Amino acid sequence: MSKPKVIVTRRWPEAVEKHMKELFDVTLNVDDIPMNVEQLKIAFQTADAVCPTVSDKISADVINVENKTAKVIGNFGVGFNHIDLGAAKSNDLVVTNTPEVLTDCTADTAMTLMLMAARRAGEGERHVRTKAWKGWRPTHMMGTKVTGKTLGLIGFGRIAQAMAHKAHFGFGMKIFFFDPYPPEAEVINKFGAIQCDTVEDVLKQVDFVSLHCPGGGSNTNLMNAERFSVMRDTAILINTARGDVVDEPALVEALKSGAIKAAGLDVFAQEPTVTEELLTMENVVTLPHLGSATEDTRVAMGMRVVENLQAFFAGEPLRDRVV
Ligand code: DGY
């Protein structure tokens, strides 16, 4: 029997690519150059499975291409707002993702940004590297204390819960959250977390706000000028979710006017382009979408795609079916 034909849109960790070669008739992207719309359409007309990631826009235009052979989209990543799920559904295309395996690393990145932004670590590092540092002094680069403070989580799914665990048990932080689909009381009680009825209820009573909701749809620009004005002027915003959840011009204004104190950002609305003004602000820490970027996690994500594809081609139930 011939092996299923699989097209992978970007370079994946070597161990996963090797494993895929054993199992599938796989086309890898050895140059790691993002595929354009035409190339993506051809992939859907050539392969049984297309395996994209967050840097590929799998729009209705791509999915609706004529003479499709693809039956499944095995997404490398947990977020899927770059895939038009409605188009996938109406074309009978199955979509899978890679939850769980990236939970801790993404939460670690959120913690990293929280600590960096609070303790002015990016600014301090630039200070040392540019030889601007004149030595220790009592008033030098005083930041915000993290331990014992309040943390507000917008969205309280797996990654937010992992952050709550680290922040509550590691840093003694009090947790507040908003989620339209809250977890079981048992989970909430584990962290002694306070459930709020609205995003605003969280924003007005916390020192740090960390975003953990999906991107796209009604969450686009969820953090807008009005909501920044509700936050404390000493508060710090952390985003490891999706860039479009934050209205970037409104964030720039909030930082400039002092409506909020600082921000730690791993994701941006127009990646890899970053709003110019954010790049020049000392109170902004930026990372290049590194949430899940550890060797362990990226291999685990790839293997999870493989597991989903194997189940799909064997006609077995899928562990991570999105549609
Ligand atoms: C995810 O898994 O959604 C990461 O942001 C990479 O896509």
Image (spheres, grey):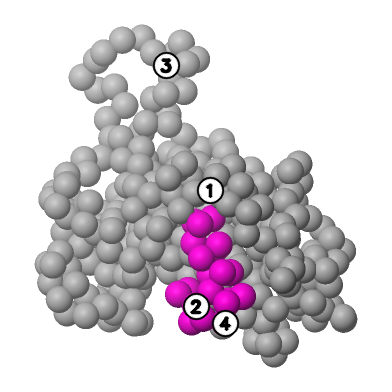
The residue stretch that appears in magenta: 301-320
Which of marks 2 and 3 precedes in the sequence? 3
Pointer 3 residue: 128
Q: Distance between the residues labelled 3 and 4?
A: 57 Å
Which amino acid, mark 4? Gly
Residue at position x 39%, y 13% in the image: 133
Q: Which of marks 2 and 1 is in front?
A: 2
Question: Residue 307 lies in magenta, yes or no?
Answer: yes
Pointer 4 residue: 315
Q: What secondary structure is marked by label 2?
A: loop
Quadrant of residue 88 within the rendered picture: bottom right
Which amino acid, mark 1? His
Which amino acid, mark 2? Leu
Q: Which of 252 and 1 is in front in this view?
A: 1
Residue 32 placed where, x, y %?
72, 45
Work out whether residue 231 can be spotted. Answer: no
Which of marks 1 and 4 precedes in the sequence? 1
Pointer 2 residue: 318
The yes-or-no answer for disc 1 within 8 Å of ligand 1 is yes
Which of marks 4 and 3 precedes in the sequence? 3
Looking at the picture, does residue 248 appear above or below residue 285? below
Q: What secondary structure is marked by label 4?
A: loop
Q: How far apart are marks 1 and 3 (CA)?
A: 25 Å
Q: Quadrant of the C terminus?
A: bottom right
Q: Nearer the viewer, mark 4 or mark 1?
A: 4
Residue at position x 73%, y 60% in the image: 25
Work out whether residue 177 can be spotted. Answer: yes
Residue at position x 48%, y 82% in the image: 317
